[in-house]
Image: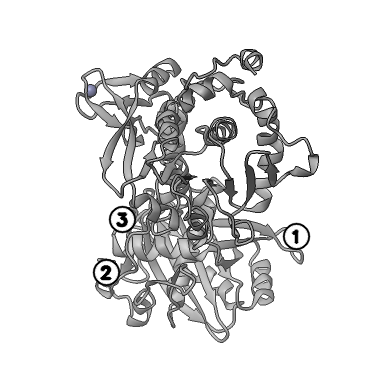
Amino acid sequence: MIAEFFKLGVNPGERLSPVQWMSRHVVVPHSARNTQFDSTTAQWMNEPIEEIAKDTNDEIIICAPVGSGKTTLFEALLAWIISENPGPTLVTGQTDKTAKQWAESRLGPMLEAIPSVAKLFPKDRHQKRKTEILFPHMPLFIGGANLTSLQEKSIRWAIADEVWRWKRGMLEEFRRRTHDRWNARRILVSQGGEEGDDFHDAEDLCEKREFSWQCLCGEVHPWDFKNIAFDRETDANGAMLWDRVAKSARLVCPTCSHEYMDDPRIRRALSSGSRYTVTSHGAPGRIAFHYDASAVWWIPWGSLAVEWVKADLDRKAGDTEAMKQFIQKRNARRWTVQGTGATSAEVLACRKDYLRGACPIEPVAITLSADVGQDTSHWTTMAFSENGDSYVLDYGTVTGIDDMIQIAQSQKFKTPDGREVTPIGGLLDSGFNANAVYRACYLSGNFFFPAKGSGANFGSISESVLKEYPTMPLYTVNEFASKVSLFIDRIAKRKSPFLFFPKDSSEEFLSAFMGQKIIVSKKGRKEWRSVAGDHFADSVRLNYACAQQLRKAGAIEFK
Ligand SMILES: [Zn+2]
């Protein structure tokens, strides 16, 4: 026995903290940075690990940016549990498939590479399946967040991954597995999700701790991308100078304005000297840790800045998806849709001092799109300014969808400088009568393209190819996100870039934007309630989708 201890390099009776134990024993065969677990690599993990080990805690949450070593945390933690603090353990990922893949490709090889864990593996290979390892002293279950995996088991160590993607109610099912054990621990790890999801509701019950850095002036500040400064410059043609954005990134102290260069040694030194600070109190035994990607020293601040500016340009073009991803995956914070719709007064306030049929600006593009219905199709023509503001120039209805080609030819406007401007393209909604719309788009000769709405709760616009018309793309527009952008950001909040209507807009036109509201379905899903007679609003959303596509294709650029 003693000989075995010496062989393993452990002194009998020595009590190591979990982080010390991991540093001594854990090997990470697949890691890009270290093959040996190193407690100085990801400092932001050390305090959470020590809290996880304390029997006085019930639930530990780590809200972490992607690529910050959280999978390594799970693996090191499991090794420590199996070797040092055994008890029935459940690891729950998003799906059975992802959990199984991870167990097979990463966890298994890693556990077998650690002598003190490998010697505990069951001799009988039937006790060792991909989703279940029955060690002689404890079972380890691995599965997805579903009722089958979370069925009747009494668990001491319950570990949950990517909780933001779990179906509502699964977290409570997961918690139930630990109810009859006084020393049970639940560990929830995830990137940011959405306001009101189970993960962030759990986080809000906790004492919150923020990973914070200390400036030379002595002040301690939570790591926050907001403190990364950078220069945003464009060339003479309005194109962003990305190199300038990346090279100018630096960390600025909000107290003394001292600037820290974006150098890996500086980033690592600041991260090493960081510690958690309590920012709000919560229920006893529940702690939520959070850190921002700017604390993760191997991610250059310059690349975060470039990513953010790109997301901001998309947002200005009416596409919030990249910003949502940045907030969830880089800031590791929840995405919040603030507001639930637009009031009638807010719709009326969009009217500006120009008449229908006039173009009050020098536009970078004019688009014409239509919502196609059974008897009537509703169209709008919109002009976009160089900063992304949008102006409805004209609107109307047609009975036959092929009539849209005549409308496109008739739309001509004079700008304040006296230029004549015309629409350069548009989208026709193919959700109702797909074949007629495809045909009309085909006949328009690359002026109109078909688009349909999608009920997905992610993404903005995607492109697919039509079998019947192999040269014509079909666009799929995320309805929920595009309605948030139109009704909440542009109309209710008057967020830049703005939307303007002509001052003589008709009641029929304006009412299409009224009564729009987000409701919560029986399944707990947020959705826009359906509003009769909102076709003009749909055609405006299609114009935004069109402008986004033109931007992606490099045909127009917003500042
Ligand atoms: Zn300072």
Q: Are marks 1 and 3 in contact (CB under 8 Å)?
A: no
Give coordinates of residue 221: x percent, y percent.
27, 30
- Choose the circle earlier in sequence order: 1 or 3: 1
511 lies left or right of 553: left
The answer to whether residue 142 is seen in the rendering is yes
Mark 2: secondary structure: helix
The amino acid type, in three-letter code, at marker 1 is Pro
The amino acid type found where label 2 is placed reads Glu
Is 431 situated above or below 447? below
The yes-or-no answer for disc 1 within 8 Å of ligand 1 is: no
Name the image quarter holding the C terminus: top left
Q: Is residue 255 left or right of residue 523?
A: left
On the image, the x and y values in percent for residue 36 come to 59, 20
Nearer the observer, 237 or 323: 323
The residue wearing badge 3 is 495
Foreground mark, 1 or 2, reads 2
Q: Which residue is mark 1?
A: 470
Marked residue nearer the N-terminal end (3 or 2): 2
As measured in the structure, the alpha-carbon distance from the residue carrying label 3 to the one carrying label 2 is: 12 Å
Q: Residue 526 or 429: which is nearer the viewer? A: 526
Q: Can you tell me whether the CB of the residue at mark 2 lies under 8 Å from the nearest atom of ligand 1?
A: no
Q: Residue at x 39, y 67 (%)?
A: 393
Q: Specify whether 278 is left or right of 390.
A: left
Identify which residue is drawn at 35% across, 77% down: 515
Gap between marks 1 and 2 measured at Cα: 43 Å
- Write down the residue under mark 2: 346
Quadrant of res 130: top right
Q: Is residue 557 visible?
A: no
Describe the colour scheme in one phrase. one colour
x and y, in percent, of residue 215 in the image? 26, 21
